[in-house]
Amino acid sequence: MIKLSALNITKKYDRAYVLNNVSVYVEESQFFALLGPSGSGKTTLLRIIAGFLKPDSGKIIIGNRDITYLPPNKRNTAMVFQNFSLWPHMNVFENVAFGLRLRKIPNKTIKERVYKILSMVHLADYAEKKPQQLSGGQQQRVALARALVIEPEILLLDEPLSNLDAHLRDELRQEIRTLQKNLGITTIYVTHDQREAMLIADVIAIMMNGNIIETDSPDVLYQEPGCIETARFLGELNEVEGVVLNSENNFCMIKTSIGTLKAKVSSNFAKGEDVIVGFRPEFLYIVSEKTENTFVCEIVSIEYVGSTINAILQSNDQILRAAFSPLYFKMPEKGKLLVSVDPEHIIAFRKKK
Amino acid sequence: MTGLFLLLLIFFLLFSVYPIVFLFWKSTNVSIHLFPIVWSNIAVRHSFINSISLALFVTIAASVIAIPLALMTGFIKIPGRNFWKKAFLLPLIAPPFVSAIGMRQILSRFGSVNLLLMKAGVIEQPINFLGAGLTGIFILQVLHLYPIIYLNMSASLENIEASCIESAENIGASFWQTLRKIILPMSLPGYFAGAFLVFIWSLTDLGTPLVFDYSDLIPVSIFQSLTDIYSNPGGYVLVIFVCIIAIILFFSTQYFLEKISYVGIVRYKTTKEPLSVGKPLRAISLIYLGILLFISILPHAAVILNSFSEKWFLTVLPERWTLHYYREVFHHPIAKISLINSTLYSGIAGIITTIISLAIGFIIYRTQIKGRQILESFVIFPMAIPGIVFAFAFVLVFSETILDPRNFPVFLLVIAYVLRRMPFSARSIMANFQQIDISCEEACLNLGASRWTTFRKITMPVLKNGIVAGFIFAFAFSMMEVSSSLILVSKQQYFPIAKGIYQLAGRVTDGPYIASALGVLGMIVSFIALMMIYKLTGQENVSISV
């Protein structure tokens, strides 16, 4: 069931489109991430949903209420900000209780609900502390509790982890995910960090230049991206230009500078069409004899990362990156290498004119 | 460096700490048992009550004016928002005792307002707006001081993050709820800092009551007691009283500020869009701002008119105009000498203040000398001690010594200027020091530059604006320093501007006109200084202790 729809949202600043006819549909209890580089319009979209900005055109609908022109305080959404934004003149308890007090809920109930939510974020013992006495991670937990305690219809998170250090970020990300699943709250999460989005979201919408270019689950977006921008944005991509030789039964043969490659495609290409062939470094593997989709490379350099062995290879002037399994420990740092990539892991994109 | 540190230490101990300690020590000997006797004097009791109530009501009135002002310019989307934000610095360019001269012209029995009202037939008999003088003092102080609360509170408001306000709206708070529960409490630190300054300012303002010839106030009593300082203990008691109030208030404000200080909260500045509010609220705001600005600059305008008027008596506006009094400024013995003197004194004070501030900044941030932090306390110390107390203590301590202000006041006057401006100039420069990451200097040293080259090429360019701003600040506001100027100087040849204006304003013939012309020159200097500081530092809250 669709819980939130943003329909044909357009927003301009000084004639430049920040959002250009964007639509999103978020299902009940879904964890929905808006992922994009800075300036792509994701925060603007979130702020329009929260009601801090008015769209130039388009509609925001929660359930079946049109809330496009409702002020933020009447929307029953709750937002967690990048910079925590706790109120320094109130202690943790008062910060969390604020929204409940506004709703004139009896004190006893407020106390119960605040402590319940505080223990969910592991901060029940900190109720009397002032925000400035807490660490960054704790402050952000309070902000999360403050948003969740009012039981909003939609939880909005605007890069909530970007001001935390790496370790805390992982920890809090998992907590947010668990809380969201347990409470079943519909959540929209804005981030520019693709790893974070992949780890946390059920569905990711990728935004670029004020448009949503693709929306799907993280694994589909990563393995079978519908466009090259998505593929480039989510992780590393080897790109090789080529021409379609023939195309049938969802497979096509493509002539490239590193040899003829077989790729799995969702729609058939015309013979002679210019394409870009893309495959991810980790899908390259070393083989001992030449079969389908194998090619010879010169090793340019090898880096040991630990979890992978990153190699830069060269095949007929084409530089390729590979991330081999650490099983190839002590592989030679010079010389030739025979590598392969399965047709399922090669994607052909139409070359834009 | 240690030598410099010791030198600074001696300077502060001798001219800042010792006089105050001496004052207290002396007063425990002289005045404790005299306190009941002094208190039994009705006139003294009267001035006590007057002064405290004046300060209290001025603070309340200034708050009532300044709080909405800060909120309007801080949050509401109004046409000309940037203009309004700066416009309310204007009242600060002249100390109230200068605008008092203009105020007398407007509000006196046969001043412009009464004449206008009588002409229009609204009243038949002139209204005594100024009362016995206290009302006039109240009005002028309020009009002069509300910007101090406004500036401090605005600084606090600026620091509230947009998302703190949005979070409240977002979880259901209305505009007024957000205002009451989030915005106002979060701007309290700025408000209190401003209110403290206003209260002490009003309590110890000497110039304004003198111009209104009103003597039932503590500062005036202190001033008058100086003539018989050794035979009349009244002055002591009052000075000690003022000093104790100031110190208590200063430290309780500091304590309170620390308690509610928001340092330590993780924060990242976000730009705050002004709120679009409904037409009625916007219209009310604009009307409020317009009327307030008009009233605020009225006394200044009157001073300006006064300085150009050949005759202004029993008419709404001057009858004939002249530049005569500006020529007089450079010829009249009192005006000429006080203009030259003040420029000289303030120039020297500005240079000394800047050098000392730089030295302190350097010692605190670039050396490891033990106990260097104490310099910071010395810098702030004069904030807790009103100018009038300092001046009184100087007279007390240094009379009959080689520095006796009755013989040669210039030395002590300059020192008083330096101490009074130090908290602001030094902190502006120290703030700049903090901005320079020490590794930037280390990188320069590391590449082979000497310490001196590093200071010249790396440190100085960053400090430059702060130093110039610190100097201008010290210079301009020493020109307009009142209490020490009035108290320390008695010989005409040493008159600074404030004393000159005071003397001239009290004369019947052309005195007030020349005083006005002098005042206008002072305003121009202050105005240019404010603009320059604003340009140099990009800050609005620079003029906090005019």
Image (cartoon, rainbow, N blue to C red):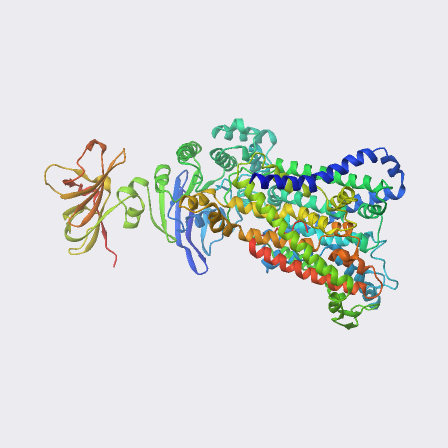
Instruction: Where is residue A271? Give x, y as percent.
Output: 15, 55
Instruction: Where is residue B253? Give x, y as percent.
Output: 67, 39
Q: In which quarter of the image is the C terminus of chain A?
A: bottom left
Q: In this view, does B311 lie above or below B403?
A: below
Residue A88 vs residue A17, the one in the foreground: A88
Residue A235 vs residue B146, the one in the foreground: B146
Query: Do we see residue A74 in this rendering?
Result: no
Residue at the limit of the structure toward the top, as seen here: A125
Residue B339 left/right relative to A131: right
Which residue is at a point 53% across and 26% down the rendered structure image?
A125
Residue B447 vs residue A56, the one in the foreground: B447
How many marks do you count on the picture? 0
Residue B329 left/right relative to A331: right
Residue at the limit of the structure toward the front, as seen here: B402
Residue B42 left/right relative to A78: right
Q: Quadrant of the N terminus of chain A?
A: top left
Instruction: Where is residue B520? Give x, y as percent.
Output: 71, 62
Instruction: Where is residue B528? Give x, y as percent.
Output: 63, 60
Query: Do we see residue A208 in this rendering?
Result: yes
Residue at the limit of the structure toward the bottom, as seen here: B320
Residue A188 vs residue A67, the one in the foreground: A188
Give the quadrant of residue A293. Answer: top left
Residue B122 left/right relative to B444: right
